[in-house]
Structures are given as structure tokens and as C-alpha cells.
Amino acid sequence: MTERLFEGADWDFHTLQRITDACEEVALKDLGLDVYPNQIEVITAEQMLDAYSSVGMPLFYKHWSFGKHFAFHEASYRKGLMGLAYEIVINSSPCISYLMEENTATMQTLVIAHAAFGHNHFFKNNYLFKQWTDADGILDYLDFAKNYVMQCEDRYGRIEVERTLDAAHALMSHGIDRYPGKKKLDLRAEEKRAGRRRQHEEEVFNDLWRTVPKGVAKSRSALSIERRRKLLGLPQENLLYFLEKSAPRLAPWQRELLRIVRHIAQYFYPQSQTKVMNEGTATYVHYRIMTKLHEQGRITDGNFLEFLGSHTNVVFQPEFDDPRFSGFNPYALGFAVMQDIERIVTRPEDEDREWFPDIAGKNDVMGVLRDVWANYRDESFIGQFLSPKLMRHFRMFHLHDDPEERAGIRVDAIHDERGFRRVRRELARQHDVGFIDANIEVVDVDLAGDRRLILHHHVIKGSQLNETDAKRVLQHLADLWTYDVALIEVDANDKVLREYVVSPRPIPAAVA
Amino acid sequence: MPIHIIDRRLNPGGKSLENRQRFLRRAKSLVQGAVKKTSQERDIKDVLEGGEVTIPLDGMHEPRFRREGGTRDMVLPGNKKFVEGDYLQRSGQGSAKDSGPGEGDSEDAFRFVLSRDEFVDLFLDDLELPDLAKRKIAQTESEGIQRAGYTMSGSPANISVSRTVKLALARRIALKRPRKDEIEELEAAVEACTDEDERAELVAQLERLKAKSKRIPFIDPLDIRYRRFETVPKPVAQAVMFCLMDVSGSMSEHMKDLAKRFYMLLYVFLKRRYKHVEIVFIRHTDRAEEVDEQTFFYGPASGGTLVSSALQAMHEIVRERFNPSDWNIYAAQASDGDNSYSDGELTGLLLTEKILPVCQFFAYLEVGEAGGSAFDLSDSSLWTLYERLRNSGAPLSMRKVSERSEIFPVFHDLFQRRETAQEKTAP
């Protein structure tokens, strides 16, 4: 029998080291995980609150909205309305996991297995993260962003910078490339690029150019609309990118700020698409590791029971009529599907052979799971692997709520033979960011004429934008664009449902 | 694979402090409004107790494009009895609706906790005493003289005898200056001595001693020390607040209550600025007397009204007990505005000649009955008088108030920065 990792609830740094080594052994040998080097940091509750307010990152540029979130979290934490997470993990290399100091030894083990191996493996291997994030560069980039914002505040004033960042934040959810571009993001190079550009500007600066008389502007009417749109890369759904490249009157530093916000939004984009998978993976991994450690006799029965207690809380899924219900719990759903895949691979039933001919009875659980973790996101993962058995287990049903329908909300499908595929398709769609975020794109702008920027919102299923918020966001957009902005909501048949036109606010004279 | 385990617990905290300050700065007007509202609901005593405030999210809202309405599809867990094709009644956004986490519920208000200091700072932030900025150095701080050790040079008047003698003594002992009785003893011995040789030796010894005591003076210029003085700015860390109130029959309980609230707010304000604040209560009818607080607010009194009597009493008390160079003097007068007509001239004279020159601040608060708007009252005799004085340049602040809720705004207006106060004072 192997030596116990710890006794009771207390831990010290040697215990943490032993725990990590033991987890690593199971993770690498038994589960065949492939992880970034780990860095484990022990923090206090106050530091956890700090981390909350800067979206979990260890460093971030300064902005009032983070202060607002901090004040909010602090107030609800103090009142006991909110517990704090046991850990935060950062998709970076080395992969940084923050552990709360008040966790017991069992909880630390759970958290290390969960974050430092589960999430870590997912970050390193999932195709979305590989495609969109640069784990090596992110911390350096955030450092650059922080310093850059600070420099801008020194040079151009805090209020100016704040105005630009406010606008950029409002458009953050529409500052994302949804399809892979020509080249991979290299955040380290970003910093050098910004530096080189500044240097170049300083070198070639010559005040004389200002005095050179400008010729008559060339007539652009010759350019066909098609060509104009092509030149501007329209239609463009990445609003921040479009503004950065094409807004006529932005200063170079403002473009750089938009770029920073855009890069950060892009960095978080995969996380929003893989919530279920990410948590499911981590939960599955910690469950496997903890079970193994218990089998090996490295943790006691008592500690294992403590673990099972927290684990059960984490994967608890209230039913729809439960007051605690607030949608599907990504931990519960993800973990259930992972476990179900394990069952299908090792002990398939006839139904599974029919539904999952590729993996049923394949017997290589980790091989299948690693492939799943690498190549799917929530939408495709649910669409592919949610089994009838699981739908029956969760007793899923699909409601269709059409406001026009007088009779009420229709039950469209339930967990039966007729409904399995429809329920699964609908649940997958609920996890598709393409469906969750409003589909807004820049369609046209007449740069030679009145420079009005025209956007379209393609309304799906009659769900239009919230009016007050839309106006405010458009105001920000117009301020950056500095000319009128029109947003037209059109339905699938190109019928105009609603039109917003917003003019930019006059830029107030420099505030002392 | 090497694993780094790092203890971050000892890292300096307050990483979010900067962001929090930015947030407060941005939300300043909102938070200030909230603070003002909160403090109106509270007892004046706990007005500065810090704590939770609620601000409307409106100004601090971070807008996003978000969709709402339309046809909704949802997959839910926990089906118990539904079959395909069933219809559920819409029971007013019933259980089938999701609870809209995140943005949905954030519209109404935003609550958070201000520390006591943050609260007080915001509360008093843009209050500033009239002319205080100007007078800050001259009046709230005066030059004082303070002993600062000894010096080798100085005026004879400043010689420190004890220190000089002490040093001389030390020097005499160190250099072994013969003491006076030593010489006398030797002289006596010479006198008494019969033997020639011995006598010669004693005389020589005596000569040596005398020479030595001449060489080593009793007090050397080196010993002399003078007391050294330094001038230091001396903060006047004390203030006295005069509460003057008309207690004649025309003042109702309600009016007194208004006055009391104003005094308390003034007290809170002064308390924050000065280490030591004294309060003098002077009530008057047709004659004035200094009373304790209980009598001031609740003691019965009757008679006519002579405002000059109170001013006279205040002037005497200042002369006796509160030297204007040591005390910052603040006065607040509350009255319903009645004054005997013949008293006007004397009142004005006392105020401009005696009272205002020694006061940092003189506020006149005219209280009215509940329900009566302060603005449709015709000007009272006292108001007319004070207004005339003020128009001729006397530094007076004056206000009319008739509702409890008006107290704070009035106080706020009175103490606002000078420029804006002047524009607003005349109602």
C-alpha cells in the first residue's frame, strides 16, 4: 500500500507538492493527458475577489468597470450572498491555477486535479483554443496592454482613454473573428509591432507635410459599390476590427486600444463556446484522478467521502420547476456526457450501437475522450454525443414559446423515440454562440459621401435588440466612427423591422 | 515536469483599489446623490456613519447588444408529465421562463458598501466654508513662538543663566579651578604658619592657586548660552460655534426642530475640521441669556423680540472667553424673522461693527411653518435688514427653510464654494 498523501484537513506546501506529483502521475500515465507546465499559486479570499474583477486574469489594464465589478462582488461576498470559487485557472503557458487558502487538503487535491490537469489539458488540446489563443503570449500581452493604456493616459488624458475604452467594451462582443483568418495570432509579436509602428512614426515625422497644399480629392464616384465594399472588406461582422482599420478620424493610439480590446475578446471567445466541455472535461478528470488516488490508498475513506460530497454539489442539476433552477449546469451536463461516453465505449447497449456506431464498444475510453476534447465545441459536442439514455436520465423536453400562440407554450418534443433527435438538436443550438449573440454586421459605408455607416442586424426568430441598450451601444459606435451610424434590423426575408440612426456626440473640448 | 508552487498570500493586497477609485470617481455624482439621500433618511446623529448605498445603475450601465422577445425555444430537464403537443399556460412569466441571469436583473439598482471615510468625504466633499481657502493660512493657522534649545549668540535679554552657570561649573571642575574656600583656607594657613620655609612654600602654593583661578575665570564667554526661539505656524485647532435663537412665542416647536437640525449639521461639519469645538447657546426674547442645550431647545420663555440683545451677549462672551486670534468663531442664527422695528439699526450696527469682523462665518436661517413654502412668504423685518447689509457687502449667508427635508440642501448651499454660493443665495 502506498503512503498517504495527507491526513485530516491540514496541508502545507510539501503536501501540495506531494498532491501535485500524485495527480500528475495519474493524469499522465493513466489518462494520457498532455498539459502545459503547471504553476500553482495559493491566494487569499481578498485576492480571489481581485481576480474576479479582472476577469480572472492576474494582470489587466485599469478601468472603472473592473472597480464596479469589484464593489459588486465584494458587497455580495460580505453579505454572504455569494461564495467564492475554489480555484481560478488561466489559459496560459505555464498554466496558472489559483487555489484558495481556506480549502482543505481534500479540496486542494480536487482543485489541482480539476484545474491543473483537467482544464490544462483542455486548453492545450482543444482546437478552438489552439486556433484562437496564444497561451505562451497572453501574460506578456496583458502586461503590454496594461502599460500601453497607462502610457496613453499619461499622454492623452485619462478621460479620453476612458471614453475610447468604454466604447470598445460596449462593442466587445462584436469584436471577434468567428472564422479563422490567414494567420495565427501571435501576441508576443503584437507588442513588438506596436512599438515598431510608434518608432516609425517618430522617425518619419516631419511637420512640413502639414503645410503642403492638398490636391483636389479624387472623385470616387467611379468606384462601383461592389468594389468599394470589397476594398473595405464588407460585409464585416467584427465591428472593432472594422473601426480599427476604417474609422476615418481615430488617432493611432485609439486604434491600438481597439485592437487590444479586440484581442482580449478573441482570447476569451473559445471559453464561451466550450463551457460545457471545458467543465465537463475538468470534472471528469478530477473524478478519475480522485478515484484512482483513493484506490491506491493515497487518500483515506473519510477524505474520499468529503470529495464525493463536494463533487455531488458541483454536478447537481436542479429540475426546471425547482426554485434553484437557472438553466443547465455545465458541470452536470458535461460530466454526464463524458461518463456516458465512457459507458458507451466500454459497455454499450444496442441503442448505443445504433446511435454511436463509431465509438460503441471501442474499449479505448481515453483515446475516444481525448479525441472528443480536441475536436469539438459545446454545440457539436452535444449535437454528437448526447445519448438517448442521458436524455431520459435528465428527462429533457423541448418547449416552443411563440408569443403569437394563444394556447400557450407548446411542448415540442420530449425524451421519447420521436423526440430524441429534436431535443438534442435544440439543446445543441442553445449552446451555439452563433445563435446566442446577435448577428450584426457592417454592410455599407459611403466614404466619399456622407460617410454614414450602415449595419444590419439579421433577426432570428423575431428576437430583436433591446432598445435602450442598442441605442447606447450605437452611440458609442457613432462616437468612434464620428459620423452617423444606422442600424437596420431585417428579418430572414429582408423585411426591415426597425431602424436606428445615431449621430456622434460632439467631442467635448479637452477637459482640464 | 517541474511544478512551481507559489505562495501569493503575502503579496500586497488592494490590487483593485485603483479600479475602485476610478469607479467612485466616475460614479461621483450618483454616489453623492445616494449619500445625500441616505443621510436625509437617517438620524442626523448617525449622518456620517458610512455603510451601504444604492445607486441607480443607469449611469454606470455597460451596454451590450442583447436580444429579447421573439419566439423562444428551450430544452429543460425534469419532465414529469408532459407529452409532445401539450400546451402550458403562460402563468405570468411562470417557471418555464428562465430567470435571466446576468444582464437581465441588473437594470434597477446597484448596491455596494462605502467605507466610513469614503462616505464622509463624499458627504462633505464640495462643502467649503466661505473664504476658508483664502483665510486658511492666515486665520486657521497663526504664527507662534516656540523654544528651540540654546544658542551661543543672542541678545543679553535671552541669556539662560542656569544653563550658563551649569556649563561654567562643569568647565571649572574639569580644569580644576581652585575653589574660593580652598584659597581662603590656604591664606589662613599662611597667616598661621610660623616656620619660614613652610610659609614660603605655602605662599608659593597660594600664588599658584591664585594665578590658576585668574587663568580660569569663574564664567568664561564660552559658557554663555542664550535661549533660542523659533517661530512656528500654530494651527488654531479649536472653534467655537454660537447658536443664536429667537425663543419668543412666535417660534413653534417645528421651527426649533429645524434650527436644531441645522445646528447639528454645522456641528458635525466643524467637528471634522477642528480638534476642539465648543458650543455656546444664546437664546433671546427681548433680552438674551446664555443657556445649556436643554433649556435652549426646550425651556419655556416669553417676551418680545430684540435681536440686538443676542448679538450684544455674543459680543460680550467673545470678548471674555474666546479671543478671536485663538478661536475660529462660527455663528448661526435662527429666527422666524420677527424683530422689533426700532431694534433694526442697533442690530445692523452690532453685526457689522462687532460680530462679523471676528466671525469666520455667520449664517442666518429663517425658519417657517411646516407646509408654508419658504418662497412665498413676504420678507420679514430681519430678513430685509440682513439682505440690505449683505447687499452692502457684509459677509452674511442667509436662507429660508420650512421643511425638514430642506435642511440639508440649505446647509449644502450655504457652504458651497464661494462662487456658486453667491449666485444662488438670493432665493
Image (spheres, rainbow, N blue to C red):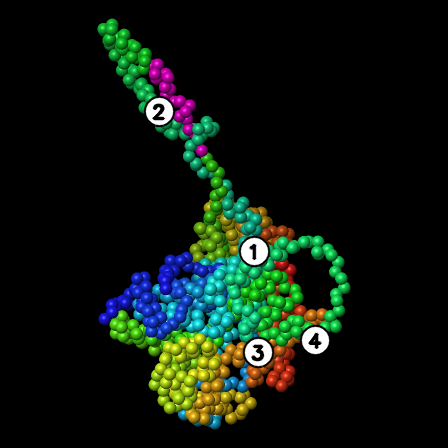
Disc number lying in front (3 or 1): 3
Question: Which quadrant, please, contains the C terminus of chain A?
Answer: bottom right
**Against B344, is A297 above or below?**
below
Disc number lying in front (3 or 2): 3
Say if labels 1 and 4 share a chain: yes
Q: Nearer the viewer, residue B270 or B353?
A: B270
Q: Which label number is shown at residue B171?
A: 2
Residue plotted at (27% across, 15% down): B185
**Identity, as a three-letter code, of the amino acid under mark 3:** Asn
Please give the range of residues in magenta. Answer: B210-228
**Identity, as a three-letter code, of the amino acid under mark 4:** Ile
Say if labels 3 and 2 share a chain: no
User: Quick check: marks 4 and 3 in contact, CB under 8 Å?
Assistant: no
Is disc 3 placed on a helix, strand or loop?
A: strand
Q: Is residue B416 visible?
A: no
Q: Quadrant of residue A224?
A: bottom right
Q: Nearer the viewer, residue A108 or B418?
A: A108
Residue on which disc 4 sits: A225
Is disc 1 placed on a helix, strand or loop?
A: helix
Is disc 4 placed on a helix, strand or loop?
A: helix
Q: Is residue A32 visible?
A: yes
Q: Which label number is shown at residue A364?
A: none
The image position of residue A127, as x and y in percent, is: 47, 74
> Dot 4: within a 10 Å radius of its alpha carbon, few (fewer than 14), some, or many (20 or more) residues?
few
Residue on which disc 1 sits: A154
Residue plotted at (62% across, 82% down): A490
Q: CA distance from mark 4 to mark 3?
A: 23 Å
**Identity, as a three-letter code, of the amino acid under mark 2:** Arg
The reply, left or right, for residue A92 in relation to residue B7 is right
